[in-house]
Structure formats: C-alpha cells, structure tokens
Amino acid sequence: MSSSYRTVQWNAHKKIYDLTIALAVTGFIVGFVILSRIFFPSPEQISTPILLIRACGICAILMLHLILIIGPLARLTPLAAPLLYNRRHLGVSFFSVALIHALLVVGFYGGFGVQNPLLAVLDAPDGSVPFEFFGFLALIIFGLMAATSHDFWLANLGHAWWKAMHMMVYLAYILVLAHVLFGPLRADSNVIPIVLISIGAAVVLSLHILTGTREVLRDFRDHAHCAQENDQSGWVDVCSVDDIPPDRAKIVQIENHERVAVFRHNDALSAITNICAHQGGPLGEGKIIDGCVTCPWHGYQYKPECGQSPPPYTEKIATYDIRVEGRRVLINPSPNPPGTHTEPASFEPWPEDQHD
C-alpha cells in the first residue's frame, strides 16, 4: 500500500518473490536445453533456436496455469495467500517469457525471407488452422494486462473496470489452448503433451467450479440466516455476537445486496462492505491490525468505524449502520456513502471473554 505512485514499492517479500520467479524461469529454460541435448544427441540433435522456442513456450504455459489457479487456491486455503500477494509480478514475468517465445518464433521462422517476418509467420497455408494467429491475439491480451498491471491504472480506472479488463485472461487462455492444440501438438504422435495440457485445463476448470460453488452455497446459507425484522425500519438480523472472533469478521450476504463484513474489535462491532477499494479483495477474510481492517490480498487498511484509510492514504469504502439487541447483530442493509462515520455497536462480553 502506497500513498504515491512508484514503479515498484520494494519490500523483502517482493524481492524474494521476484528472485524466486527469475531463478525458476532461468533454471527451467537452462535445464530444458541441457536435458534435450542429452536425450537428443546427434544426428537427432535439435537446433538451439528451436530448443529455446520450445523451452520458453512450455515455461510460459506452466506459468499461465499457475497464475490461473492461484486465485481459486487462495479462496480455499490461506497457504496460497503469499502467491496471490504479488501475482501481478508473476503475470508480468509470464508475459516476458511469452514475448521472448514469440520473438524467437518470428525471427527463426519468418526472418529469412523477403516478406515481413511477422506476416510470414501469421500467413497460414490455405486450409490450415491459423494457430499462429491464436497465439498472436493471446499475446496482445497478455501485453495489455501487463501494461496496465500497475496501481496507476487500477486507481484511475477503478477496481471494477480494471478487474473486468483483466478477466480477459480467460479468453487469452482459450486462445493459448487453441494455439497449442492446433499447432505444435497437431503433428506430434506423442500423446503425453496432449494429456498433460488436458490435465492442466481440467485442474483450472475444476478449481474455479469448486470455489464458485462454495461461494454460492455460502451466500445461500447466509440468506437463510438473515431474517427480516418485523418493524418498518428494514433492519436485518445477520448473526450472533458470539459468531464473530475478536479482531475478525463475519461475512454476511443480505439478499439483493452486496456482502457485508461485520468486524468485532474492543467489545464493539462495525459493519463495512466486504469489497476492498484496491482490487475488490475480501476484507472480511482479513483481520484488524493496529485498529484497522487489513485486506488479506495486498494489505490495504481501513478504519472499521468510518471506512477510511489512515492518513496519508485516501481510499474510502462504504459503511453500514449497525446495532446489537441482546446478543443478536442487526444491520441496515442500505450502505452509507464511502467514508461515512458510523457509531460502533457495543455489547456486553461474556465473562470468559474478559480474560482473553
């Protein structure tokens, strides 16, 4: 989290993350070339440019699959959170490897004729599937995502538009699958690569279906527990005070409204939107640190009573009016404007809580 734009706000975690990516990519490409030289000696020796093309292509595909499963894994286990924290760095690294792959292809297969090298590669023979064009379109999408990955674009476009644009990764993924299946694997008699990429696609699809189903079931369960009050005020009973651990939140889904995170702090409750202003992260899955709700995705912080980030930061999120009756927590489902101060609802702790 930064109050000003910087190329990269380096910290120890980012340095370790990026160093790990660089070492893994370099190790994979070097290892691929060395092992290929060992297993395919003369006269079957494959030329170095082709080995590099294959190494970068396979490495990029593996990185893409990792990028696509990080999100679902982070929804299933907090152990994946360190990978999610700087996923954009992994995305830019992936684009760099994919771009090197594309440049090598254009230079090797299109650079020795009179035609423009790029057009020579994209000009598919009559009757053949234009798999090169599929890869070219995917590369353009990945390039757009890499170019707009910085918080400058996120802040000026807004997280909703920024997120929608970056959802094009799924279209690009389909294009990559078409590029591989109709290209390098089409004439390969070895079924192992086809099996491996099929397994990768199945894992990506299965994890997304699993996490999506889990979220829908959780919302359905929350709907069943949010009973509308009989008075005319429209307040909604969402949970019990005892359902919320200290300095943590209970995420509730009120019908026809967005998710709300009810945080417990210092024997009082505050309700805020569950959507972080940065990238739409799930605030209710974070915790209160130094008196501020801290997003589990990238560490953005907000004061629970007003939804404002602590100075010098300026982000604001919506708050909700809240009250406690006995041990029941009630929320007005109509959100207040972002940054609106709402009085926390105090409650009487159980005797055992006073000794925590």
Image: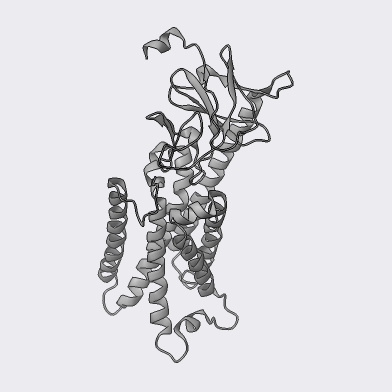
Q: Is residue 242 above or below residue 189?
A: above
Q: What residue appears at the point 49 percent right and 51 percent down from the top-left corner?
A: 155
Q: Residue 312 at x, y = what percent?
A: 40, 42
Q: Residue 139 at x, y = what percent?
A: 48, 67
- Indicate the quadrant where residue 354 lies: top left
- Indicate the quadrant where residue 5 lies: bottom left
- Number of dots carrying numbers: 0
Q: What residue appears at the point 46 percent right and 10 percent down from the top-left corner?
A: 350
Q: Is residue 6 left or right of residue 165?
A: left
* Picture quarter with the C terminus: top left
Quick one: 292 or 217, which is closer to the camera? 292
Q: Is residue 289 above or below residue 281?
A: above
Q: Is residue 294 left or right of residue 306?
A: left
* Picture quarter with the N terminus: top left
Can see residue 46?
A: no
Q: Residue 109 at x, y = what percent?
A: 42, 82
